[in-house]
Amino acid sequence: MTNSTIQQVHALENLQLNALLIEPLQTVKWRIDAKRFSELFIVTENDQVNGIGISWTNPNHPTAKYIQIIATGYQPQLMQALLENMDGHDKVILSCWEYETEKLGYMKNFCFQLFRKTYMESYLVNDLLQTLQHVPEVANGCSLQQMIGNTQLEKQLFSLVKFNYEQTHLHNEAKEKEWQLWRAAVLDDAPDMKVPCIVVDDDGKISAYMFVHPVEENHVEIGWMGKTNSFEMQCLLKTILLHLANSCIQTVEFEIDTTDYFAYELADLLALKYKISWDSYIYKEQ
């Protein structure tokens, strides 16, 4: 008969971890090593750690408590411990791959609700251009490099980024902050400053944006995107892809949420219904 106990700890050093935890632990190990967590619980059986529960916060989404469970089997006591102290938050969020059936068991048994699916997929630039061959390019695309320094356009762009982000994160409210801080956040992500990723109409109004972030020599990621009207995002995407192809970029990666209606316009083009999703669940205290 095993002797199972749960306790709160401050680190995992000098603890005997079950070998089955080593690989899945890598997703949060950096957070534990850097002390970037609020709570850390372990379940031990015969002096071996068979389950880990961790919580943390995100200053950009201050109303939520984030959690993750890594265990060799179903450990409901870990979830109970993580939900016990809301610490001023009104919601708890856990994310997992859609095939992680054990974690889906926690979601069902503790009354979490699915609120977002996220797709993270890579594609060959030339394959996407082939699919978009009948889509027109934009004639009035400009780069971040061209825009930075124009105070009026900067304010318009980053105010739009702020508004769009807030509107696509209504389930987990974003922290209210000025457009200048959104400017800093976007530029801190080190986007490619030379890609024609912003559309400005004939009246000097921004119609759409789609920021590109270099990852490797021949690979980039497209993340932040949004628009103000009925502008077709595929047109801007094609313009960007042509620039990338001319720059010898071979592959492009997207991170698209179902709650982001601007980015999700690309769902059919990217065949997302056939892809595996990273699912986010929310728990609200009754």
Image (spheres, helix red, strand yellow):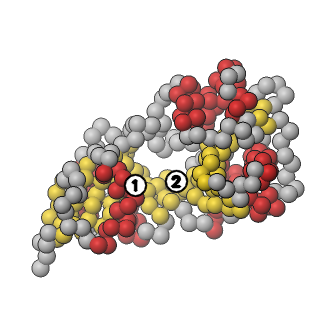
Q: Secondary structure at mark 1?
A: strand
Farthest residue to the top: give it. 151
Q: How many marks?
A: 2
Taking the spot 69% from the left edge, 33% from the top edge, the residue there is: 144
Mark number, residue 94: 1
Image quadrant for the N terminus? bottom left
Q: Quadrant of residue 166?
A: top right
Farthest residue to the bottom: give it. 1
x and y percentages locating residue 54 in the rendered image: 30, 53
Q: Are marks 1 and 2 in contact (CB under 8 Å)?
A: no
Q: Quadrant of residue 269?
A: bottom right
Taking the spot 68% from the left edge, 22% from the top edge, the residue there is: 149
Q: Residues within 10 Å of mark 1 (few under 14, many from 20)?
A: many
Left or right: where does residue 65 sit relative to residue 159? Answer: left
x and y percentages locating residue 230 in the rendered image: 77, 40
Q: Residues within 10 Å of mark 2 (few under 14, many from 20)?
A: some
Viewer-side residue, 152 vs 232: 152
Which is more N-terminal, label 2 or label 1? 1
Asked if residue 286 shows in the view, the reply is: no
**Does 69 sit above or below residue 284?**
below
Residue type indicated by callout 1: Leu
Mark number, residue 250: none
Taking the spot 33% from the left edge, 67% from the top edge, the residue there is: 22
Q: Secondary structure at mark 2?
A: strand
Mark number, residue 116: 2
Residue type indicated by callout 2: Arg
x and y percentages locating residue 45 in the rendered image: 16, 71
Viewer-side residue, 208 vs 115: 208
**Does 148 sit above or below residue 286?**
above
Taking the spot 46% from the left edge, 55% from the top edge, the residue there is: 280
